[in-house]
Amino acid sequence: MQRQPLPFDPQAVEAFVDLAGRRAWEARLAEIDRHAASGPRAGRAVRHRHALERAIERLRHPLIRPPSDAELRIAQLATEAVDLARELAPTGRVRWRQMITGTLGGEGSLVPLFHLLRTAALQRSRGFNVEFAALEHGAPFDLLIARDAGEAEVVCDVMSAEDGRLVHRSAWLWLVDRVELELRDWLAANPGRYLLKMTLPEGLRGRPLDIGRLTALQERIRSLLANRGRNDDSAGAVLRLGPLVAGDAKAGLPTWLRREFGPEAHLSVTATGQGVLVLAARAARADAVAVALRDRLPAVASARLSGTRPGILAMFIDDTARDEWRGLRERFELEGEARQFLCCAAARPVVAVTCASRFEMFGMPPPDASEDGELRFRNAAHPAAEAAALAPAVLSSV
């Protein structure tokens, strides 16, 4: 059966912009465009990070092209944001506007806002009554959900996958953009196929950018190429320059590189004429996104749950790539670390932990996204774990 398109009301999108404030909205879009012009690779990352803002802006001009399914889902959530503003009491409406405007500057994005709206919609679809307790009453938790005789507090929290990476992708993209022109010039003078491998035991920070370390690494790459050196083993990074011997040409260079260096490697290919130079960087340890999630959960539980009702920690893991998100689920890394947390004393008020990403928010089908719209891990030790009224929100999905 063909899926019916989601309803789309252009006026609701305009109403969302009015809610945010037209002047603030236009200023934010201009700021995003300025950051996106910083370089081709870093610019793509900026546009990805602000995909929600850009989708809403495109929806304001639907005659250019029909909205995609993902954009229609964003339009739905924008409509719910407007509806919520109308339903809230005056104090709650003020808090809601403050929350929206707080996303429109600096490192902010609409992700926390839309994660909250989507979580509420997901619980309503399961038969729960949903109250925006933080907005209405200033509660530390975001939502109070109720079904039959059961109630639970829901905290909606967002973390970045960068928290689990020693080498941040945003920093890597910034670096590659800065050395691209020099790599092209060097290749023109030294035609051939080369591989520059970098091990970065101290990592690279990307948010905020560690400009000092990035600039120093850029200078080391420049020096290595200028001197046609093969190795640079100075502190903080190990660089190896050698010939590129890529096997299995039928698979294509990008596919071979990913298979050769693994899903966590940071890769870049510069080609000019007959020359090819591949940059491949790795940290000294594997990425630990799921561990970063586990480390974050105790603080979220202690700061934001009242302890008087069962608590659900609805975690949104941002800045994940498609293969990375799929791997985290298929290797049960998120489940393993979440269940470690659920065995701790800090998890006593928590009846379940859920995890979602942009792939669920945008309505991507499995295997890109979780089949049930989120991963759920129930705390079997919690007194409310077997409560039938809470089952749709807390039963483990794996």
Image: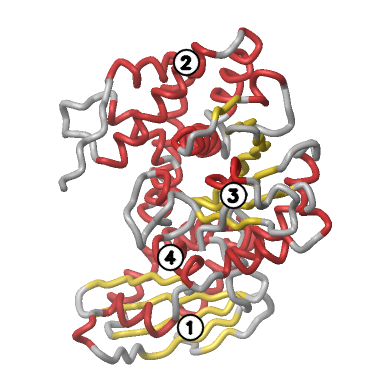
Expressed as whole percent of the image width and height from the top left, the position of residue 257 reads 36, 80
Spatial CA span between label 1 and label 3: 60 Å
Query: Disc 4 or disc 1, which is closer to the eye?
Result: 4
Marks 1,3: beta carbons within 8 A: no
Residue pictured at 41% horizontal, 72% vertical = 267
As drawn, 258 above or below 86: below
Structural crowding at the residue carrying mark 3, measured as other residues with C-alpha within 10 Å and reported as few (<14), some (14–19) or many (≥20): many
Q: Mark on residue 394?
A: 3
Residue 85 appears left or right of 6: right
> Under tag 1, what secondary structure?
loop
Q: Earlier in the sequence, mark 4 or mark 2?
A: 2
Name the residue type under label 2.
Answer: Leu
Query: Disc 1 or disc 3, which is closer to the eye?
Result: 3
Spatial CA span between label 2 and label 1: 57 Å
Expressed as whole percent of the image width and height from the top left, the position of residue 42 reads 43, 53
Residue underneath mark 4: 326
Structural crowding at the residue carrying mark 2, measured as other residues with C-alpha within 10 Å and reported as few (<14), some (14–19) or many (≥20): some
Residue pictured at 39% horizontal, 48% vertical = 43
Name the residue type under label 4.
Answer: Arg
Residue pictured at 75% horizontal, 38% vertical = 309
Expressed as whole percent of the image width and height from the top left, the position of residue 220 reads 55, 73
Residue pictured at 36% horizontal, 29% vertical = 76
Residue underneath mark 1: 227
Expressed as whole percent of the image width and height from the top left, the position of residue 207 reads 60, 51
> Under tag 2, what secondary structure?
helix
Spatial CA span between label 4 and label 2: 35 Å
Q: Earlier in the sequence, mark 4 or mark 1?
A: 1
